Image (spheres, coloured by chain):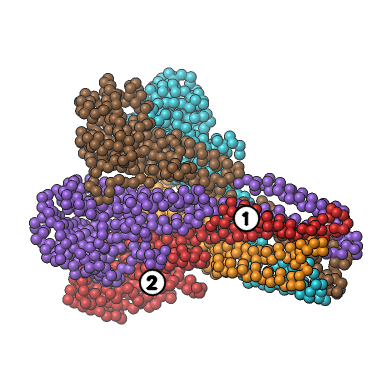
Chain colours: A purple, B brown, C cyan, D orange, E red
Amino acid sequence: MSRNSRRRRHSYDRFRRRTKPGASPGTIVPDPCAAPPVIEVIAYGPEEWFERQIQSLDELPALLATYPVVWVNVNGLGDAATIEKLGTMFQLHRLALEDVVNVHQRAKVELYGDHLFIVVRTIENQSPICTEQIGMFLGRKFVITFQERPGDDWNPVRERLRQKRGRIRNAGPDYLAYALIDAVIDSYFPVLDILGEQVEQLDEELTQNPRQPVVGRVHEIRQSLHVLRRAIWPHRDALAALTREHHDLISDETRTYLRDCQDHTIQIIDLVENDRDLCSDLRDFYLSAVSNRMNEIMKVLTIITTLLMPLSLIASIYGMNFNTKISPWNMPELEWRYGYPATLGAMVVITLVMVYFFYRRGWFRK
Amino acid sequence: MSRNSRRRRHSYDRFRRRTKPGASPGTIVPDPCAAPPVIEVIAYGPEEWFERQIQSLDELPALLATYPVVWVNVNGLGDAATIEKLGTMFQLHRLALEDVVNVHQRAKVELYGDHLFIVVRTIENQSPICTEQIGMFLGRKFVITFQERPGDDWNPVRERLRQKRGRIRNAGPDYLAYALIDAVIDSYFPVLDILGEQVEQLDEELTQNPRQPVVGRVHEIRQSLHVLRRAIWPHRDALAALTREHHDLISDETRTYLRDCQDHTIQIIDLVENDRDLCSDLRDFYLSAVSNRMNEIMKVLTIITTLLMPLSLIASIYGMNFNTKISPWNMPELEWRYGYPATLGAMVVITLVMVYFFYRRGWFRK
Amino acid sequence: MSRNSRRRRHSYDRFRRRTKPGASPGTIVPDPCAAPPVIEVIAYGPEEWFERQIQSLDELPALLATYPVVWVNVNGLGDAATIEKLGTMFQLHRLALEDVVNVHQRAKVELYGDHLFIVVRTIENQSPICTEQIGMFLGRKFVITFQERPGDDWNPVRERLRQKRGRIRNAGPDYLAYALIDAVIDSYFPVLDILGEQVEQLDEELTQNPRQPVVGRVHEIRQSLHVLRRAIWPHRDALAALTREHHDLISDETRTYLRDCQDHTIQIIDLVENDRDLCSDLRDFYLSAVSNRMNEIMKVLTIITTLLMPLSLIASIYGMNFNTKISPWNMPELEWRYGYPATLGAMVVITLVMVYFFYRRGWFRK
Amino acid sequence: MSRNSRRRRHSYDRFRRRTKPGASPGTIVPDPCAAPPVIEVIAYGPEEWFERQIQSLDELPALLATYPVVWVNVNGLGDAATIEKLGTMFQLHRLALEDVVNVHQRAKVELYGDHLFIVVRTIENQSPICTEQIGMFLGRKFVITFQERPGDDWNPVRERLRQKRGRIRNAGPDYLAYALIDAVIDSYFPVLDILGEQVEQLDEELTQNPRQPVVGRVHEIRQSLHVLRRAIWPHRDALAALTREHHDLISDETRTYLRDCQDHTIQIIDLVENDRDLCSDLRDFYLSAVSNRMNEIMKVLTIITTLLMPLSLIASIYGMNFNTKISPWNMPELEWRYGYPATLGAMVVITLVMVYFFYRRGWFRK
Amino acid sequence: MSRNSRRRRHSYDRFRRRTKPGASPGTIVPDPCAAPPVIEVIAYGPEEWFERQIQSLDELPALLATYPVVWVNVNGLGDAATIEKLGTMFQLHRLALEDVVNVHQRAKVELYGDHLFIVVRTIENQSPICTEQIGMFLGRKFVITFQERPGDDWNPVRERLRQKRGRIRNAGPDYLAYALIDAVIDSYFPVLDILGEQVEQLDEELTQNPRQPVVGRVHEIRQSLHVLRRAIWPHRDALAALTREHHDLISDETRTYLRDCQDHTIQIIDLVENDRDLCSDLRDFYLSAVSNRMNEIMKVLTIITTLLMPLSLIASIYGMNFNTKISPWNMPELEWRYGYPATLGAMVVITLVMVYFFYRRGWFRK
């Protein structure tokens, strides 16, 4: 893995807050590398329809007056002026606008006067896994969404809007906000599918051959799950806040749908925790297998060494050059008629005794 | 274990959500491989009785009008049209119907207008362990159950209905729902019995001979317990919701029975957690035993090597071919009268000193 | 430990629910091996006294009419008819009766109409540790207790009743129930004393000589603590339910005593958790000691091998049989005047260099 | 550490409840080894002052009538009669009196009628660390304290009383109780200072030389922290009960001070948990260092063995005694002119190849 | 790392409470080494402005009467008299003043009559990481801050005040307190950035070469995270207390800002926990890699030993000096025509068999 891609991976974890400590709250300091904003507007009612990329924000008031629901989608956070102007036009709170450009927020819901500020994080189905912050304002007549980059999971929602599928065209901005959040949450499922399959494959490989150097891969999957986990957990509380607290911005009907969406969040958390547990189990299993294997290797080494060293010693002894002619005490065995066969015989006996000893200790059992 | 069976095992963990992210909520996309539905109906009152497999849903309204309680059991989720028609007929909520065919839900209870949607998961007593989702709608006059496959744990309930055993024929659909849930929960017990016996057997084997390669088996049991745990935990909250919240769909009498059922759930959770703890203990115990054993093997290796290497060195030294005739400095020992016995004696002394040294360090103690 | 005794140990963990999944709730299926019931009755008032083993349940109504408090103690759960008859006579709930014979309940308190059903588990001070379920019904005028086997911790309570010691004879059945529960809870203390002493002894042995194969004993103590822990934890909630909820079956005075009893439960839980922690610490300590020791052994092996192998190589080289007569290049050292002493000197120098090297690396330090 | 001192250490953990299971509640069975009680009385008002060790309890009623606040301090729990008499005189609840002599209570607060029973545990700044139970009764006009042994942390409080420092002489018994509890809690700080310094020193030693056998010392510190932790945790709940619940025995003013005391408790808990974490980290660090070191030792062993064994084999081969005269096939190398230098050269080449191989595998890198 | 710097590091962990156990509460005992106080005053209103370092506290009453908001910043806690005088002048509670000089408090908020006492801890961006306590009193017209040392994170706040940036000059002391707390909290971010980068770099190094002795560095980072964690956690509760409880000292507007500040705290906690998890994962990964590597080294050792020992034995045997002339039984092989080639051949065959055996066991696979 190149240095670059690793840097990339942790872009979510290792942000740099651009607002200096002690700066005035609500200061909007966009990332200098952020893309300039592209503004797409969809405005609709049960029968009305307007969809266009607009150049100037001044077109918005007319749209707000004409259409029941206006959805302003801002791709790219590179221009503070645009964001500030939107803030003034829709009376958005400055603290929320500051959070829009600091793209490292946890998912959350905050009520500011007559609008809700919602942060969700979408997951990008690529390797290494990274997340993108989506800021969303929900008012009585509008939904404003801010994305870091173009490219999102919302094309099916746009299609439903265009084709009047389901109840989306007849419902208010709260239902639109739900549909957008739901699409974001559901985008976690395919990523989890892939990770889950990787875990399963590792498990299979380990069970069949625990010698594979799988530790590195387990480590990488755990890292991805780590990123996922940090991203998804706060959604639980955020959605609970949306479904339980009684803002009149959200109708009871939509609440039922948000409850379903929260149920999906809990399923995702459950899957992530599950995969984390499986990873831990795999690592433990692997370490046990390595211990086991080391034990086996040590046994082979010890058996071989213990069997052959005494024999070598005997052979070395009879390789000494003491002068047998000088005295009868000097290695008389060398002059015996059956000295050699007796020595070999002694070696065989020693070997058998040792083998028996090892057998008794169970070293030949697996 | 073949690749196939392993795939099978995780069928619950590794589902694929067929509904695309961003799709309209309440879209019913059945699994293309799911079996076509077979619909069994049991309708009854204290004295009335009707039991038949029906071909057309159109027979249902008449039954609903005639019998106090109608139980519609749908085996197989392969046909969206049938499910939608049932949904329209009984005014079931679309989000609930979507969950019926997405067979990876956690156990839950949801109140939609005048009916309850209940999800429970039944366990299948086979290896590898897997779970099946059962969706259940409880209304004022009906219970509708959706199963993935034919074959269930409900034959004893059907028998009780047929033979008017207990209070089941006199009670309403809430009691029927309780009886069905109770049968599902109780089906966990035999599975846990088998797993528990396996754990106990492993414990026994380990205590008697900690050399067995039991790690793999512990790993497998842990996996099964993992599946069980994920399946059973949510029932606790679901049943708590049923017993505590005051829907008027459930009578106080039935609540008492559901409380008993919840008690069983807590017992099952307790058993699962218990077995998980035992598995962890077993693995730790095993690893300690392996460490212990490695230590013992290392001691044997070190003792043998340390005892024999110096002796070998001495023997090798007197096996050198320095020319003793050239000078009196060259290995005069070879020409000594008692050179050989002295050498052997030195070897014995060295050995004894080393043995004493090892004894002092306690290496001969266990 | 024989196979039998191990089986025994887990009798609490590995029960078999005799009620089939799907059976009618409240079905009383006694264990076919259970002993036939022996029924002891104590009936008393401040002055009245009756104590006898009765043969027929028909004597009970008369006693109930005569004495303020009647305590029916049933030893042995082998006869469904007796239990059912008692149930009818005292209007006990069928679900509670079912739990009486399924002797694997966790401690709990359940309110059924005008009586309380209480389950507690007593510990048996034997090895291996096992637990026994005690079912208890508390009504306005009676206490009924069901035990699996004869032999209990209640003789001191009976003695206090007989001798009018304390306030027990003047109080109602709630105080009797408290006294019985208190005796059961207090029976955990001596067992914990013994386990605690074993833990302490192990600690002492380990500190003085970490070579003992203590792992097995730690494992056994942990198993016992495991059984204790599972048994005692639910009492906490059960007693909290008794002290906090306001049944009028229990007087405020008795509540004060139950609070004291709950305090004992918390002390027991504290002790159990404490001992479990100590066991974990012991195991960790042991593993560290083994690692340490292995390190030491490896050092000895490596020092010996590294010191002696080069010397052996030198000796082997001069043991080669190259013909020194053919050329002056072939091992001229063998013909040198001081060849042998020079070789021995080289060996000593090599040894000293190596010893210095090891010394520098700190291998001779502990 | 001698057997005795270890016994001592766990005196808190391993008590023996003297009250038999099933005994009448409120039975006062003092420890037969406990010291006979010495009773010190301090009675005071804003201007009044009385301080003496009294011989007979009969002096107390007069003091109670004369002085606004009476503090009775009982050192030694060896005499049941004295305790019972105090109980009768001040109408103390029997269950509380029983707890006074069973010196293994967790810190707690219990309200009995018109007095509070408070248990705190003081720590003794000695090695091994042990704790002492202090029972305290707080009534409208009195504070009664029971200590196991003479010698306490209260001399500064007595001094403040004598010298009228602070508001203590003007306040009621509730402020006295606070001052006593505060002194007990603050006595934990110096002990924690010492333990903390030991942990830090161990850390320093480990960082500089991870070879020290520090495991034993970490184990000992953990044991001490264990005792501290068990002792201090329950104070948190006890003090919370004192500050939050509205007994009229404690004035709002005193509550503010108790809140400060509770804050100290939380600081102590924080420090204990912190030190426990540091100990775990140290152990993990040590184990990693040992693993590391073992790895290094194994590398040395393997390099030496692998380098020298092939050379030894070659030397041994040319030490064989095959008769070169019989056939030209028998070891002709021995008769070559450059046989010996060629052999030595081969050895050098083999060594270099192996060194290169090890270098490539990175075995010479640290 | 020098002994000194390590001492320094734990200055926060290992304080010494100067107040003796049992001392009167509210005793102000400053650290004898603490710097003498330097008092800076900023007093302002929408248009008014006063900023000066004052010499005498007697100037304060005039300022309080003239300016809407007075901020007194005390650098250095070395003079008890100054602190006491401030306490009297602003009617600050003695317990709070005691906490001001005991610079080891956890972050907290306490309400005393008509002022709030707030403790926060600022982090110092140096190595080793340490923290500094800041005590803050918030009254209706004033903010008083106590710092241990000169040098703080508040210059941007002062600049905003001077330049009338944002709403700070028009708001009350509650907004000033918020701005100061916010600056303190935000000072954690850069420190976390640096630590996070270190973790990431370690991860990268480990993935590319798991042989680095990174354990020591992981240990050091964990220590820093430990200090950070202890410091930041209590801020969460403290800020929750500020935002939720309804003191009228804090306006609803300011509460919204404090909520934002609390959100930052949660982000910091999230980052710290995240980095701790990553550190644990790194250590586990490292240990697995070491295990792996040890296994590999053991395999090399065992293969070499097992291959060469039998060959050595054979060579040694034929190096024995049995007299072949005495009997045909004594090593007739030495006299065979093809004895030597046959022996070499046997060695090759043995080697091949062993290599095959190792290959089958998979020892040549990675």
**Host chain of mark 2:** E
Could you tell me residue B175's position as x and y percent?
A: 30, 30
Lateral position of residue B156 relative to residue A169, left or right? right
Could you tell me residue E285's position as x and y percent?
A: 48, 59
Query: Quick check: can you spot residue C122?
Result: no
Q: Which residue has dot 1 on it?
A: E355
Figure check: C279 above or below A128: above
Q: Which residue has dot 2 on it?
A: E124
Quarter where residue B63 is shown: top left
Q: Are marks 1 and 2 in contact (CB under 8 Å)?
A: no
Question: At numbered mark 1, what does the secondary structure look like: helix, strand or loop?
Answer: helix
- Toward the viewer: C173 or C201? C201
- Toward the viewer: E273 or A229? A229
Question: Given the image, on which type of amino acid does mark 1 rest?
Answer: Val
**Host chain of mark 1:** E
- Position of the N terminus of chain C by quadrant: top right
Figure check: D64 above or below B244: below
- Toward the viewer: A86 or B2? B2
Could you tell me residue A143's position as x and y percent?
A: 18, 57
Tell me, for residue E218, which label it has, or none.
none
Quarter where residue A130 is shown: bottom left
Could you tell me residue E341's position as x and y percent?
A: 74, 59
| Label located before the other in sequence (1 or 2) | 2
Figure check: A177 above or below A149: above
Q: Which residue is drawn at 39% across and 60% down?
A: E273
Lateral position of residue A347 relative to residue C252, left or right? right
Q: Residue at x 82, y 58 (%)?
A: E335
Question: At numbered mark 2, what does the secondary structure look like: helix, strand or loop?
Answer: strand
